[in-house]
Image (cartoon, rainbow, N blue to C red):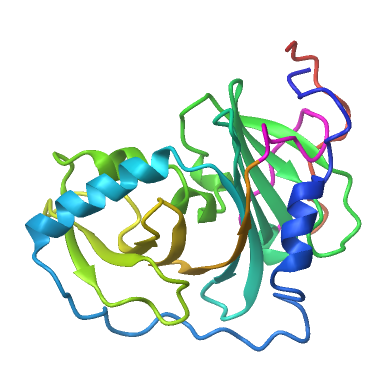
Amino acid sequence: MRLPSGPGRGLPALIATVLALGLAGCGGDDSPPAAGPPSSAPAATGGSLDARNEFAGIAAVALDRRYAALYSFTGGDGNPRNVVATVANDGSWRVDIANGALGGTADVSIVHNQHGVYQCSLSLTGAPVTPGCVHVAEKGEKVPSRYDPRVQRLFRQWLPVFTDRAAALSVSAVKPLDGAQGGTCYSVDSSAAGLDAPVDIGVYCYSTDGLLTAARVGFGVLKLVRQVPAPATVQFPGPEVGGEPMGTTAPEQGIASQPETAPSGAAG
């Protein structure tokens, strides 16, 4: 098994603390729907060359930032949901996304550690689930699109591209997003006509110490609610198992919607 040892499986106490102190009921019946993405981009407030250099610098700071934080994410359906992002002191990270798999009917976690990238089933919304984690990519690789909830990409995946001043990006400083908890916001677009964008284009907001405070991309809006200090490492919600990871779309009738629960034979 490749799992960290000890009693930390399941939702870690640190994450539970973030949830308890933060957005109680986000995504529940008592939460008012968050406003969807504005139809137009915020007005630019700075030169693109200066903004590109500033953005690369703050992205470099963000690469070294360690934290656990609760966010509110509103996708295309207009319903807010909880997202908990943890970047541990040892460099491992985990992003828990409520209703992030199986067409919005299952909670999902993406975990990255020294052994690779895992997709895990868990319960953030109270649904009965047997937690389990399936290896989906090697260390540093992307989650295959079929299983990719996408939200986790906003925290770590694009930072190396943001720091690369030679990357085909056009960056402008823009007004803060509504509801963002401080920070400086930048509009990020591709500067290579006819080519796929190297990142999720949109608006990214960072505090001066490198914490992502808000983002607006094509698939939704993310806003910081609360943060606490980072743990030493991240834990899996459950054991590593075999079987198929959860897809992003709703399962067909009669097809299993959770990973197999038998532990895999992988050695750690």
- Residue at the spot 76% in from the left edge and 24% down from the top edge: 4
User: Position of 112 compared to 132: left or right?
Assistant: left
- On the image, the x and y values in percent for residue 246 come to 69, 46
Name the residue furthest top: 267
Residue located 71% across and 36% down the image = 244
Q: Residue visible at 16% across and 75% down?
A: 45
Image location of residue 74, percent across then percent down: 55, 73
Helix, strand or loop for the magenta stretch, by majority: loop
Residue 131: give x, y in percent of width and height: 84, 43
Give the total of numbered labels: 0
Is residue 207 in view? yes
Question: In the rendered view of the protein, which quadrant contains the C terminus?
Answer: top right
Q: Is 167 situated left or right of 120 in this image?
A: left
Which of the 4 image quadrants contains residue 259? top right
Whether 90 is among the magenta residues is no
Magenta segment includes 238: yes
Q: Nearer the viewer, residue 55 or 149?
A: 55
Does 191 appear above or below 43? above
Q: Position of residue 12 (x, y in %)?
A: 79, 45
- Residue 256 seen in the current view: no
User: The N terminus lies in which quarter of the figure?
Assistant: top right
Q: Quick check: 30 above or below 92? A: below
Residue 152 against residue 264 in the figure, above or below: below
43 horizontally vs 205: left or right: left
Q: Residue at x 46, y 28 (%)?
A: 140
The residue segment tinted magenta is 231-251
Front residue of 39/103: it is 39
